[in-house]
Amino acid sequence: MPIDKIVVQRLGDELAPQLVADRRDLHRHPELGWTEVRTASIVARRLLDAGWQVALGRQVHADESRMGVPDAAELTASYRRALQQGADPELAPALADGFTGVVGTLLLGEGPTVGVRVDMDALPIHEAATEDHRPHREGFASINPGVMHACGHDAHTAVGLALAQALPQLRDQLQGTIKLIFQPAEEGVRGARSMVDAGVVDDLDHVVGFHFSTGWTRSEMIAGNGGWAATRKFDVRFVGRSAHAGGSPQQGHNALLAAAIATQGLYAIPRHSEGATRVNVGRLVAGTGRNIIPPEAEMMIETRGATEELSEYMFRRALAVIEGAALTQGCTWTVREMGGAQSAWSDAALAERVRQAAERLGPMTIYEPEPRGGSEDFTYMMRRVQARGGLATSISLGADPLGIGRNDPDRKRVLGGHTPFHDLDEEALPLAVRLLLMLVGDLLGS
Amino acid sequence: MPIDKIVVQRLGDELAPQLVADRRDLHRHPELGWTEVRTASIVARRLLDAGWQVALGRQVHADESRMGVPDAAELTASYRRALQQGADPELAPALADGFTGVVGTLLLGEGPTVGVRVDMDALPIHEAATEDHRPHREGFASINPGVMHACGHDAHTAVGLALAQALPQLRDQLQGTIKLIFQPAEEGVRGARSMVDAGVVDDLDHVVGFHFSTGWTRSEMIAGNGGWAATRKFDVRFVGRSAHAGGSPQQGHNALLAAAIATQGLYAIPRHSEGATRVNVGRLVAGTGRNIIPPEAEMMIETRGATEELSEYMFRRALAVIEGAALTQGCTWTVREMGGAQSAWSDAALAERVRQAAERLGPMTIYEPEPRGGSEDFTYMMRRVQARGGLATSISLGADPLGIGRNDPDRKRVLGGHTPFHDLDEEALPLAVRLLLMLVGDLLGS
Amino acid sequence: MPIDKIVVQRLGDELAPQLVADRRDLHRHPELGWTEVRTASIVARRLLDAGWQVALGRQVHADESRMGVPDAAELTASYRRALQQGADPELAPALADGFTGVVGTLLLGEGPTVGVRVDMDALPIHEAATEDHRPHREGFASINPGVMHACGHDAHTAVGLALAQALPQLRDQLQGTIKLIFQPAEEGVRGARSMVDAGVVDDLDHVVGFHFSTGWTRSEMIAGNGGWAATRKFDVRFVGRSAHAGGSPQQGHNALLAAAIATQGLYAIPRHSEGATRVNVGRLVAGTGRNIIPPEAEMMIETRGATEELSEYMFRRALAVIEGAALTQGCTWTVREMGGAQSAWSDAALAERVRQAAERLGPMTIYEPEPRGGSEDFTYMMRRVQARGGLATSISLGADPLGIGRNDPDRKRVLGGHTPFHDLDEEALPLAVRLLLMLVGDLLGS
Amino acid sequence: MPIDKIVVQRLGDELAPQLVADRRDLHRHPELGWTEVRTASIVARRLLDAGWQVALGRQVHADESRMGVPDAAELTASYRRALQQGADPELAPALADGFTGVVGTLLLGEGPTVGVRVDMDALPIHEAATEDHRPHREGFASINPGVMHACGHDAHTAVGLALAQALPQLRDQLQGTIKLIFQPAEEGVRGARSMVDAGVVDDLDHVVGFHFSTGWTRSEMIAGNGGWAATRKFDVRFVGRSAHAGGSPQQGHNALLAAAIATQGLYAIPRHSEGATRVNVGRLVAGTGRNIIPPEAEMMIETRGATEELSEYMFRRALAVIEGAALTQGCTWTVREMGGAQSAWSDAALAERVRQAAERLGPMTIYEPEPRGGSEDFTYMMRRVQARGGLATSISLGADPLGIGRNDPDRKRVLGGHTPFHDLDEEALPLAVRLLLMLVGDLLGS
């Protein structure tokens, strides 16, 4: 028996003020991946208060599977910052040292297990401080310099908190188990793998992810995304030997030159006939001074492929290029894994359930998935659940603050993600809560 | 009639305490090239107090000939810092905006004109804070983070101040004109050209430069250095267009890749049969993030040649490489001149006068010049004076704080220049003053 | 009214001996692209003898649209060789200088116009001279050293000659116009464009191409191929300046180095999000001697794209890379267009007519098209006919001489195209003639 | 007692017609390095006829020390050609298989041992066939297509033959031992090492080499050359894997790209502060066809240095570059040594003896040596003799056929070496014979 639509709509209405307040509080206190101590401690406290079982920190992360964790100094500094900004002092210690995931579990008797994934981290972007940027104008812009929720994870977390509040109120209508999975470090696709490797999704029959998109209005959505590229994110460091460039250049081993050779070699990895591949050297920093043969070089690299096989092909070729480039200059080299994601497609059957849930709530324009070469580490959860026989889907929800539709000729004006001007339509938040309540209700309807 | 040796030695003894005090005060307040407002204002005040005519700031610099001047924000900040740290408030305004040279002139009747060049700037190095580093142990280490007198210009300026004090006291024994030329921005060979182009050395019959060397004890020296490489220092900036590396790589114009191609091309500029050449890409910073086609790249480059012709050959070839590399990626490029020096040799006749002056003062081991591929912008002054029929010499004076001679098998232990542990033998300072007084006395002896 | 199957089968049987004789004669006298003077003159003579109107040489080629034409010396030498080997002395002159196309037209009253394209040229391959190679064993291997029909165009031409013989015999059953288009220089995709630009296909309602494939048996086929990559074939020549590498390297402008830089830049052209792209530097020859700075370099390059837009994107980027690479070394550069093809898909409606014709003749396994990244210049004809509202199809016909089917696990043993051991199943030839007669009959059936 | 000048001049006069005849015969029958079977057999026969002891072939070469020997097919073909062109059929067999050196020894009692080195090989150059080229006009141009004496070794050998004739006639005036060393394969610096390693120069007290220069008239010379660069000549072959560039580029391992990367890396080997270095990729041939990922690449490379240490530095760095470049593309690589030379300077004492001998014969302008970055494998002989306590010198003798002196403003008009128009002043030949007779006479004068 499907869940009562009236109840769901009422819950959405009641939660709307809190949703906006939470989103704005989180927006004001953004935290980078693996340092979401304030955010995660608030999440855990709310889950506990609402009656959820809570696992967190090292309980929900496989240590070695975490990728791109900041160094100890940064973790320490951000932990202190989090406490100053209102992290829960009892729960924070369990979230220290780069273990900031939280999982709430609600046991509602016999029935399937449904997981909803919520990501929490912000981006290394300076938020705009101009009058036309609402967070600044209305006083909830980031207080952490150089850090900003520019991809909507503040809104995702607010929705997750609303679900934590609302779902226990529906317990009479549901049978089964619900898991709310609050994941750190989605940016850079660093966090999901360590939660999957800790077994967090191994008991799920359905897993659902969602993301707001500022490219569409709140009446537009995708019920089952797919086509993400598998990807590898890694840093390479070349170490050679410095020498005075005028006095004894022959004594140097030029790490900058090794990096330049590697760069050209990487972009020249052969295209693959079985599908799209990508490679990028997104950043290169090398050398110590104008007149010194550069002893060190650091590169930030990513490879992608339409499938894991293609991604691994690119990665394998990249390693050969890097090793060869190092050898030409007599340099040593190290590779550090910084992130990764798999390719994945939503299950049509679960996407159809999403569509039905959405349409029960009102008219909605639902698009087909549009693979665009991007990556997302929710794919680790999708693929694990699918591999164990479950279903997965990833939902995109329109939240354009300007209210311009996807088909509008002026669509270019959207305030895109990953920019200092990112903002979103806060009226989309209760809609998302309603949809997810309706979907969970359908899946666990008694 | 040569100057009285007894008088010179007495002056050296009297000035010794002030020399150490000045050197330590300057060491404690190091200032980077073109921001030596505190140093230069102190120099100018002392010259005025001792009766010298003083020209400074825009009077002694050709604006367009300055190289590697910091940006306006940095000039403003360092000007404020200089005032806080004791810059002379009356004289500082004339030294603002990157015009920090000072020239003192002492007119002593008919006779030749002798110039002595003194450099004043420090290096972008964090000074060591360990007990075995005397400036730290004795409390005169740099208070300006990341800035340090690691090449002895603090001692050079202290010697210059002592000359300003002492030379007027010898006016009865001298006939002619003396110019003390306090030059900014020697590091990176950025400052001398603009003083030469302002005509500062056009009236000199003799020009003398000096430099302390921690590779020798204070009883070792070179009377007439030579063989510096001509050099060009320049920054290159490539600007392309960013694009998402997964979603639309074809829309990017990859500035990092342009820089990598340029790097390889630069090192591959053909060797030249007429003499030694050099090229180095000392630093490369490019890109904004791992998943973005890099829209910008910055390179710090230098070329050198045993002669100006060879240096210009390298520079000309480098420009072709850079332009071509930019074109391959559809990037634009700009070159910014950051420094430069000429090749030069001291005149044997003037070096002989130095040798005679040194030997009148006591036993001294005098070495032949050792060209080593390094560069020095005093060469601009030497070449201008030589071109107008005058004589030039550059003196190197031993000042090893460990007292280890050049021929000692343990010589590797020296505390070399351009390191966080640089220090020097302060007893070498009065010796330098005596030598320069004796030399000027000989040249202007009535 | 469809054509009489019995008549068609009988014609096939009657023509079989001649088909084999013609194929073997052509196999023995292979001619490279634009030098098919013997082949084309024989074709033209047979068309005339069978009552076709014939246009040839400059009548059927737009001069400037020809690509990859050999130089004058080679054209002259091969013309002489053709005459010695039996070219028709009356017709040969019209085919000289690289104008070797022939078009036969048969006017059969009111009705649609159908064109069939036949390619005639051979490859620069040395034919195998071993006993297991039938052409050698049976005495019809190539007598022109280094030239070989290793792609089956000998069989294609034999089929075309059989059609020229047979179609006039069916004139009572047909209404419309038939054009047999004998195209030179398909290898390297050089010849079709100049025939299209001369208007050869502008009057066609249907255009049909066909190709034997040694990957399948004679009971396997594709009725409507598609998915060829658009491509550009071009040669690049860098010219610099030689110099003695020991004595005066600085006087050189290194064309080999320019080519090396271009090579790396070409492979590094960004992948495109809208479809597959390719680039290859298939051959590079540079330099004159070990101790000379290389003054010249020659590169053979191709770019491809799933669409013309993608191919042009690659070509445009390639030109920028080449120009930039030349500039880095102070070299000049020239690009010479050597070939090209468009992307294309067969029209389903015409492929269906092919399928029907095939099935009327007997059981046949018909596969779907398999795009594989290859290119074919029949696409120029297809696209022109399609652009004017007509229909086009390209047929692949199995001719594995070993009789191993596509699904056989031993399929790797096939005697592939473009190898010294290429051969084909001669029993496939009359089958091809029957199919094409049946198809033309259907299309022009009165 | 010095040798009688009158006798020497008379011998020179008598030998002049034979000198020209021999030079022209050799010019007409040029032979590349290691294939000088005709030349060497004629030399050996003449030595025997004149009473010299003769060692040749494997007797005077260390097998493994030969460099750049042609392959067996080429050796066989050229051996046959030599016999057809008049090689001595009795002596030729001992000179087969690339062992073409000949040493004549004349024992004249107690006294020092003097060696004179003569090189015999020609260059792979097509001789000019124009009326302004005297060898063509007068009928002694090369009859071997693509091979030419364009560096004067024909004249050197003619002088050697004249010495073989003349020296026995002076036996009464000489005491000691004379060795005439006819060396193959000087071009490419391939032949001398294997003679040195066979001990050919181990008994010499003095070794003398000589070379005609078309840059000066016959009254200009250098008595003791020096400053040749040490050098390594080597070929590199990369082997990867071919693949269709459109259909499966990922299956390829691109040897052409490896060579391009190696090329850039080679030219970018750091300059050395201790002296001049050089590197050149003089030739690169790679790839099999436009649409095939190139499976093979061949490079002809040389490195040089002002000293052996510098040359080895370059070679060692080059190997690292090559290995690294191969690795980037998953290719294998091989290096084949093709030639080499050492650095060397003539001994001043022996050069002074040359000067004295020259001046006794008449007025002569004698220049100081001019190091120019070139290489010469006579250096192996010089260095071996010097290492064992003997003296060495290399003489350059003017032979400008236009009679234009070194200081002439039109000097550019000289007919330089290594061009299709090379020729020389045949009147310089008897002068060379006289000088060498005079020198040997002085050194062995009784």
Image (tube, coloured by chain):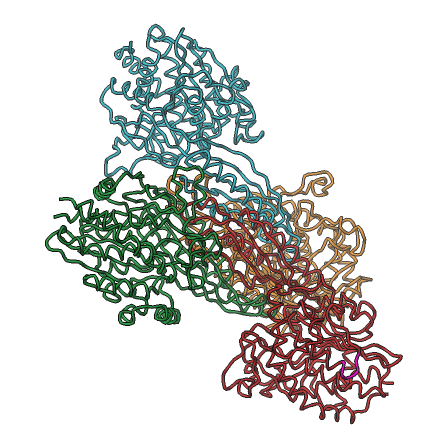
Chain colours: A cyan, B orange, C green, D red
| Depth check, front residue: B363 or A445 | A445
Please name the residue shown 30% across and 42% down the image. C222
Apparent side of residue B154 relative to residue D180 in the rendered image (left or right): left
Residue B400 as seen in the image, left or right of residue C126: right
* Residue D370: x %, y % from top left: 67, 75
**Quadrant of the image for the C terminus of chain B?**
bottom right
Residue furthest right as drawn = D110
User: Which span of residues is magenta-colored?
Assistant: D48-52
Percent across and percent down for residue D369 are: 69, 76
Residue drawn at x 27%, y 61% as measured from the top left = C194
- Given residues D369 and D192, the one toward you in this image is D192
Residue D348, can we see it?
no
Q: Can you say whether C394 is above or below A174 in the image?
A: below
| Residue C359 drawn at (x, y percent) | 24, 40
> Any magenta on residue C43?
no
Quarter where residue A109 is shown = top left
Q: Is residue A169 left or right of residue B429?
A: left
Which percent across, then down, holds residue D355? 75, 83
Is C236 drawn above or below residue A200 in the view shown?
below
Residue D142 seen by the camera: yes
